[in-house]
């Protein structure tokens, strides 16, 4: 078997590091071709020394100069590229077989699309890219013949519970519903009146998963599950009403598929992203991921609850956006990125995230999305509206 070359976009993040951990277990199968990082330059340099990629991509020329010096001093021939163009170049490079799309937020859209358009095997962690540009993104996958494999643990679980030919339509393969599980995050049982005063530290202390700060806050508000509902609709060609969200606090069942004959298939495992990463990397084969075997005796029990849409208003907004279609999801995603950033900087309280999102979603019209320019315009207008909301409401 020939060695596959991999570009890891967002290598310094939580998913990026888990990816590198899995890759390092299989040097005979995988080699790192490119690594990207945005703010943690010293960490990126360390990763370059360890994985010796052909390319590294950083945010700007100043960062590139620092990294070039460091790598040259260590005798490394890694070429350092800059910015969005650099990311798109290593995503679409002719030598690359696999792209891990693990940049957080809308910043990942163009590089992920570049990988898709180049027909790569694309491991999609960057759900925001798909949420923003859904129809265009999926059309680009069909046009280029790219292979899109979900890394989000829920979507990876659903993918594993579907037959190979699900792309012909869920009804065709006898699927009735998708059951998307959610942990409910750190505030599932917090008295509602205390929700307004929770801190970023509390929001980022997820009970089961260790993740980047943005997705941690999204998990606490359940906007993450809302984005995942939209993501599932695009990945599996499902209607919003075919996707039901189920709170499952143990995070052992990663999602389920309900078939017309009453069979319900689930994928289980320890909450460790190396499982979906290893699955997607090797698919349709299987490789070791380093994740410990699931100990059901220690798990003991599996609980399920219906989500409370008053507590988790962001989930309600995401369903609204999924049903509205067009640019609604891009508007909501952009508003939410601004809101989460403001919450992390203590400019607004936790419950104001949903208030800001609702205000932006309801004040801007959802328009048909026929071009990438239309997606980017929706993203910009929502960010502007969100900034105006912040100017009126934040301290
Ligand atoms: P993270 O914050 O730990 O890492 C984000 C990465 O993106 C870093 O490498 C950072 O340098 C890079 N980055 C940030 N802003 C950038 C910008 N403007 N331009 C270029 N690069 C930039 O985030 P994460 O938890 O690894 O999540 C990454 C993506 O994977 C997100 O879309 C998230 O929703 C998704 N995801 C994460 C998990 C998880 O367990 N962490 C699970 C499912 C899905
Ligand atoms: Mg997930």
Image (cartoon, rainbow, N blue to C red):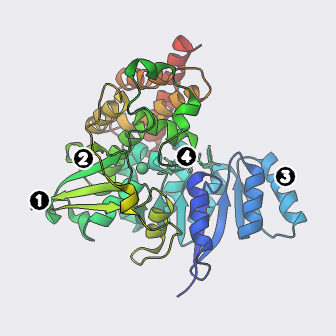
Q: Does the residue labelled 3 lie within 8 Å of ligand 1?
A: no
Q: Distance between the residues labelled 2 and 4?
A: 24 Å
Residue 25 percent coordinates (x, y)? 59, 74
Kindly identify which residue carries mark 2. 243
Name of the residue lying farthest toward the right? 73
Of the numbered discs 2 and 4, the one sitting upstream in the chain is 4
Q: In which quarter of the image is the C terminus?
A: top right
Of the numbered discs 1 and 3, the one sitting upstream in the chain is 3
Q: Within the image, what quadrant is residue 268 found in? A: bottom left
Question: Dot 3: within a 10 Å radius of its alpha carbon, few (fewer than 14), some, or many (20 or more) residues?
Answer: few
Of the numbered discs 4 and 1, the one sitting upstream in the chain is 4
Kindly identify which residue carries mark 1. 262
Q: Is residue 329 above or below residue 169?
A: above
Q: Which residue is drawn at 57% across and 40% down?
A: 213
Residue 54 percent coordinates (x, y)? 71, 70
Q: Residue at x 56, y 68 (%)?
A: 22
Q: Choose mark 1 or mark 3, whichever is in front.
A: 1
Name of the residue lying farthest toward the left? 261
Kindly identify which residue carries mark 4. 104
Q: Does the residue labelled 4 lie within 8 Å of ligand 1?
A: yes
Q: Can residue 94 be seen in this view?
A: no
């Amino acid at each position: 078997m020939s060695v596959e070359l991999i570009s890891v976009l967002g290598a310094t993040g939580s998913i990026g590091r888990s990816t590198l951990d899995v890759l390092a277990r299989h040097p005979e199968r995988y080699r790192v071709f490119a690594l990207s990082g945005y703010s943690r330059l010293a960490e990126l340099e360390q990763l370059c020394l360890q994985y010796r990629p052909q390319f590294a991509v950083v945010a700007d020329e100043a960062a590139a100069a620092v990294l070039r010096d460091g790598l040259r001093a260590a005798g490394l021939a890694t070429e350092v590229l800059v910015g969005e163009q650099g990311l798109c170049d290593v995503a679409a490079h002719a030598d690359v077989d696999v792209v891990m799309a693990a940049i957080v937020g809308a910043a990942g859209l163009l590089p992920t699309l570049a990988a898709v358009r180049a027909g790569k095997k694309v491991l999609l962690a960057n759900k925001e890219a798909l949420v923003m540009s859904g129809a265009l993104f999926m059309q680009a996958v069909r046009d280029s013949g790219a292979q899109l494999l979900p890394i989000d643990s829920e979507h990876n679980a659903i993918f594993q519970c579907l037959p190979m030919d699900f792309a012909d339509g869920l009804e065709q393969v006898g699927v009735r519903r998708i059951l998307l599980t959610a942990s409910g995050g750190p505030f599932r049982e917090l008295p509602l009146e205390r929700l307004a005063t929770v801190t970023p530290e509390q929001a980022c202390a997820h009970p089961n998963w260790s993740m980047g700060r943005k997705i941690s806050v999204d998990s606490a508000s359940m906007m993450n599950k809302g984005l995942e509902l939209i993501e599932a609709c695009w990945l599996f060609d499902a209607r919003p009403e075919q996707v039901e969200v189920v709170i499952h606090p143990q995070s052992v069942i990663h999602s389920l598929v309900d078939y017309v004959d009453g069979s319900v298939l689930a994928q289980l495992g320890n909450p460790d992203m190396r499982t979906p990463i290893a699955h997607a990397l090797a698919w349709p084969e299987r490789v070791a991921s380093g994740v410990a075997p699931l100990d059901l005796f220690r798990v003991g029990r599996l609980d399920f609850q219906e989500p409370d849409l008053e507590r988790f208003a962001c989930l309600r907004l995401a369903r609204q956006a999924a049903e509205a279609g067009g640019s609604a999801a891009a508007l909501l995603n952009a508003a939410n990125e601004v809101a989460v950033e403001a919450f992390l900087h203590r400019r607004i309280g936790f419950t104001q995230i949903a208030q800001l999102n609702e205000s932006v979603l309801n004040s801007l019209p959802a328009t048909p999305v026929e071009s990438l320019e239309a997606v980017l315009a929706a993203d910009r207008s929502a960010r502007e509206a969100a900034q105006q909301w912040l100017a009126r409401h934040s301290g």
